[in-house]
Amino acid sequence: MVQNETITEENTPKSDDDVWTQGPDGELIPDYDSTFPIINEGEVVRGKVVRVDKDEVLIDIGYKSEGVIPVSELSIRRSVNPADEVNIGDEIDALVMTKEDAEGRLILSKKRARFEMAWKRIEGAAESGEPVEGTVIEVVKGGLILDLGVRGFLPASLVDIRRVQDLDEFMGQTLRCKVIELNRSRNNVVLSRRAVLEEERKEMRQAILDRLSPGDVVTGTISNIVDFGAFVDLEGIDGLIHISELSWSHVNHPSELLEIGQEVQVKVLDIDRERQRISLGLKQTQSDPWQQVVDMYDQGDVIEGKVTKVVTFGAFIEVVPGVEGLVHISELAQHHVENPREVVTQGDSVRAKIIEMDPERRRLSLSLKRVDEGEGGTGVGEGTTELGLSEEVFAENTAEEPVAEEGFVEEPPAEQSDESIEADSVAPEDPGPGDSEGGYPAPPEEEEPT
């Protein structure tokens, strides 16, 4: 059975007779108004561009007169050229502002129609967390203005993960951003591109962590240089080269060797997958100078080197680039030395004798006073003390230099034992294990020969 359908005047199809109406004298005249669509102010309509002038655009929406879009209502951009915004024949949406102005014209707005549609889209994106896309149309103090159909503000601090020096480079680019603040009453939209980049990098970081293993050699770019090392961008995740892992030789500051943007080959030393941290080494990709020392010299050989540092307990001499040996104060001269600077100065070229070598622990003991002793025998003169490779001579370097920067938390120093405190009080000038002088403590004081 066919259901009854309510027939109303609005949904009754018009016949040819419906376009005629009775005039004041009873004659039939065309009812043109009934052939036009019904439009209301505030409504969005669709029409075709039929003319483009320098100060306005005419739109045919099928109404009794063509709609006029003033140049100020074409775009949210300032000082636009109508020919850059629309072309004849384009179909566009426009909002009805005034059905009839003082001159009887139908006034429309393209930018307000776009605003209404864009605002609904932005509200939906803000609720779902999905990013929105917009083109950078202005660089202003403190950030960028994006065209989203509405003007969206992207603060400079949220343009990228790292600080951007020149915002002008983003002019004209299309950026994906998240909506972080929305206020319809003030037409205020605040965006963050950084949030989108961080989310993308998080996925990339995990993929890189899954791919890497300790011992791998990878290529990256120096992204930042700090006092305690350098950060390397490994295509989405930063790894840290600690200053102690930059070179086999002593480095005062990472900027001596590296610069931001430089491409480097590094070795993966350790991975903390839970905290997404990677420790890298640069010197491990270079030849170990200690192997050169082992190949070139033996215990008892006399070498030539340069004094690199003078300390209270002796002097350090560079044997080959990257390898330094210690001349203890007792091995500087045949006579008693109160201050090593009485005998040597930083930068001096000297000849020294190798009295002890320990490649495994990377320790080299040298002597200046034994160089002139006769060849043959041990080369240890009367009244001298054989140092020996013992814990009393070389203490283990157990204390690592703390790190205090993003991702690498400074550990509190280990508590000293009573014995170490007592030792410090007796010999405050002697460096303890793991000090900045390379972990070389002074050996026990020798008795003067009678």
Image (spheres, rainbow, N blue to C red):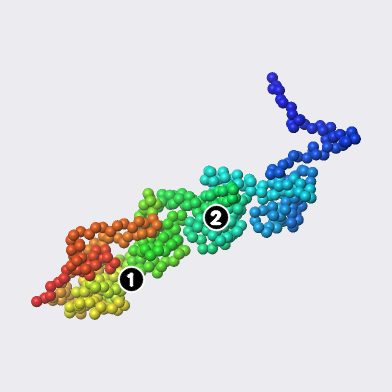
Q: Secondary structure at mark 1?
A: loop
Q: Quadrant of residue 438?
A: bottom left
Q: Secondary structure at mark 2?
A: strand
Residue 280 showing in the rendered view: no
Between tags 1 and 2, which lies in front? 2
Q: Which residue is under mark 1?
A: 321
Task: Tell me which numbered mark, 1 or 2, is placed earlier along the sequence.
Answer: 2
- The image position of residue 106, as x and y in percent, is 75, 47
- Residue 395 placement, left or right of 95: left
Instruction: Assign the N terminus to one quadrant of the image.
Output: top right
- Residue 360 placement, left or right of 148: left
How many tags in the picture? 2
Height in image: 274 above or below 335?
A: above
- The image position of residue 365, as x and y in percent, is 23, 70
- Residue 328 placement, left or right of 404: left
Q: Residues within 10 Å of mark 2 (few under 14, many from 20)?
A: many
Residue type, mark 1 in image:
Pro
Q: Which residue is under mark 2?
A: 154
The residue located at (30%, 74%) in the rendering is 308
- The image position of residue 411, as x and y in percent, is 31, 57
Q: Nearer the viewer, residue 440 or 160?
A: 160
Residue type, mark 2 in image:
Leu
